Image (cartoon, grey):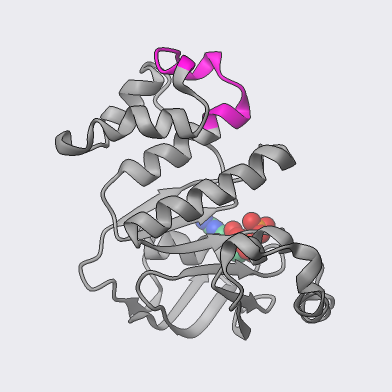
Amino acid sequence: MLILNNATKEYDDVIVFKGLSHSIEKGKIYSLLGPSGCGKTTILRILAELEKPSKGNIDLQGQRVSYIFQEPRLLPWETVRKNLELVCPKKEIKKINEILELMELKDYSNAYPKELSGGMKQRVAIMRAFLYPHEILLMDEPFQALDLKLKTKLIKEIYNLHQSMKNTILFVTHDLDEALLLGDEILILSPKPAKIVKKFTINIPQAERKPDDMQFIKEEITRLLNHAPI
Ligand SMILES: Nc1ncnc2c1ncn2[C@@H]1O[C@H](COP(=O)(O)OP(=O)(O)OP(=O)(O)O)[C@@H](O)[C@H]1O
């Protein structure tokens, strides 16, 4: 499915990307890696229709998009449960308890965002994005506020939720291990104007992936990114 069709994005004299085309396959997870400022967030914002391309177009073929931002963006005046209920279709409401349990936040369902740590708020934002009806999930560095143990657990849970929902995920990260643990396809972007310089397909089942076993790919990706640190 072609999602970016000869798309260009410019801000005044900055060309973020030019004539970018890319297809995705339904139900896969794509990790996007690239140097800082190359346009990863801009690509997600355009796919979420928060911005328009300067030229070209996007074609989501009627698929709905959910977005996990770098920061949690919860409604501060609503409880955790209410933040989730507001996006959740009535017939799915019983999923909220399940997902609160999964994310170890059951005891905080009546808490307000200001009573939560940064990592807890981000977990609520992740839950909310999964509960919001969608076919395509965009994740912009969602694990930044989380410690390693929680991040590893969340990657597993996100993968399990993805397996049951069969959503397509586009995942922006600076962390090579995260990209390799979650992605079926790893897309490497050049500095701006961004182009996809290489695509890696990971054929190891998610449960069997260990960053140490993927040393060869890690070295090649690091080499590709080396001329512009991420
Ligand atoms: N609203 C804007 N006005 C002007 N320039 C912008 C705007 N938004 C983004 N840019 C520029 O577009 C380029 C791409 O930004 P973007 O945030 O997409 O990069 P990124 O790859 O996500 O960066 P990072 O990895 O550091 O988060 C940057 O040079 C940025 O300065």
* Residue 64, x across and y down, in percent: 26, 59
The picture quadrant for ligand 1 comes to bottom right
At a point 47% along the width and 41% down the height, the residue shown is 126
At a point 40% along the width and 74% down the height, the residue shown is 54
Residue 117 painted magenta: yes
Question: 145 above or below 213?
Answer: above
Q: How many marks?
A: 0
Q: Nearer the viewer, residue 152 or 225?
A: 152
Q: Nearer the viewer, residue 225 or 127?
A: 127
Q: Residue furthest left?
A: 91
Q: Quadrant of residue 174?
A: bottom right
Q: Nearer the viewer, residue 194 or 218?
A: 218
* Residue 201, x across and y down, in percent: 59, 81
Quarter of the image that includes the N terminus: bottom left
Q: Quadrant of residue 204?
A: bottom right
**What range is drawn magenta here?**
107-121
